[in-house]
């Protein structure tokens, strides 16, 4: 099972928006609506931002939104703030045998 | 409040077996739909899912590492135990446990992780 493809880096100015892509296959991202996004600050554990493509857990600002088209999922961060500077990972269910696969990660610079 | 904490050796020699314990609170691994997974992250690299155990003792393993992995639970102690055999320097990583969100396929609460170095 190969890792999902993400751009290594993305950037934006405060107040702007940035969109990160996550490309898989029909066996993972494209086959199920079980895509999640995680935010990780340096030295910290990952934090769940988005699950099931576009759902936000309680407490996650609505500046974070998710979508999916075919084998590619996307995370958009609107109204960028300094604290959004972090690494972002996508993850997807990959079927009963492979179960779960993460993306390679994207470093967002504000 | 859900918390998870990983414990185990910080240094393992090549060919040895790693045993990590994940001690959790705030939920029960006897409740339907609940699961605990193990995810690792080598220094400055990406996350990699390794294993998962469900409340009903159903287990899933990364296909590429399946032959080396075992995950078990002790519900009386609120613990999950993860073992990886035949450790190699490339297995040097921070190992996290995380809860599988009830009824969903996503990891919603994470432990801080345990840094394991494989070196002779």
Image (cartoon, helix red, strand yellow):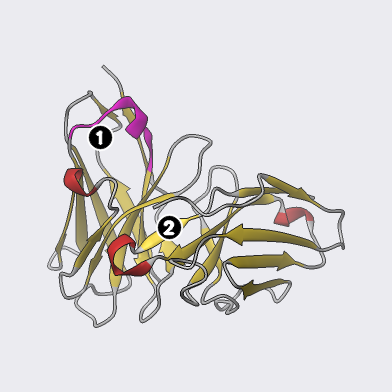
Query: Residue A68 vs residue B97: left or right?
Result: right
Q: Nearer the viewer, residue A82 or A20?
A: A20
> Quick check: marks 2 and 1 in contact, CB under 8 Å?
no
From what the image shows, is residue B110 above or below residue B17? Answer: below
Q: Is residue A109 visible?
A: no
Tell me where residue B29 appears, x and y as whole percent: 22, 72
Residue that mark 1 sits on:
B9
Q: Residue at coordinates 25% horizontally, 34% vertically from top-left?
A: B9
Q: Is residue B42 visible?
A: yes
Tell me where residue A37 appears, x and y as whole percent: 56, 64
Query: Residue A33 vs residue A64: left or right?
Result: left
Count of labels in the image: 2
Quick one: SS at disc 1? loop
Output the chain of dot 1: B
Residue range highlighted in magenta: B86-94
Q: Which of B79 and A15 is in front in this view?
A: A15
Query: Residue A46 vs residue B33: left or right?
Result: right
Query: Residue B100 vs residue B85: left or right?
Result: right
From what the image shows, is residue A102 above or below residue B120? Answer: below
Residue at the far front: name it: A26
Q: Nearer the viewer, residue B25 or B15?
A: B15
- Label 1 Cα neighbours within 10 Å, binned few <14 / some 14-19 / many ≥20: few
Q: Is residue A4 magenta?
A: no
Output the chain of dot 2: A
Q: Residue at coordinates 50% horizontally, 77% vertically from top-left?
A: A33
Tell me where residue A108 appears, x and y as whole percent: 71, 50
Residue that mark 2 sits on:
A101
User: Residues under labels 2 and 1: Cα distance?
Assistant: 26 Å
């Amino acid at each position: 099972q190969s890792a999902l493809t993400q751009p290594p880096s993305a950037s934006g100015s405060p107040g702007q928006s940035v969109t990160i892509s996550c490309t898989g296959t029909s066996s993972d991202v494209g086959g199920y609506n079980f895509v999640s996004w995680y935010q990780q600050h340096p030295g910290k554990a990952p934090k769940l931002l988005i699950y099931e493509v576009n759902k936000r857990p309680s407490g996650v600002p609505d500046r974070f939104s998710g979508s999916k088209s075919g084998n590619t999922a996307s995370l958009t961060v609107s109204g960028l703030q300094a604290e959004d500077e972090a690494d972002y990972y996508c993850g997807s269910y990959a079927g009963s045998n492979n179960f779960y696969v993460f993306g390679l990660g994207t470093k967002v610079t504000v | 409040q859900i918390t998870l904490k990983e414990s185990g050796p910080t240094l393992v020699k090549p060919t040895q077996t790693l045993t990590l314990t994940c001690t959790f609170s705030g939920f029960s691994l006897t409740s339907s739909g609940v699961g605990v997974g193990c995810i690792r992250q080598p220094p400055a690299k990406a996350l990699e899912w390794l294993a998962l155990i469900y409340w009903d003792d159903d287990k899933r393993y990364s296909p590429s590492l399946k032959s080396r992995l075992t995950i078990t639970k002790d519900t009386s102690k609120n613990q999950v135990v993860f073992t990886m055999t035949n450790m190699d320097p490339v297995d040097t990583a921070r190992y996290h446990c995380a809860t599988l969100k009830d009824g969903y396929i996503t990891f919603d609460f994470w432990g801080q992780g345990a840094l394991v170095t494989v070196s002779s």
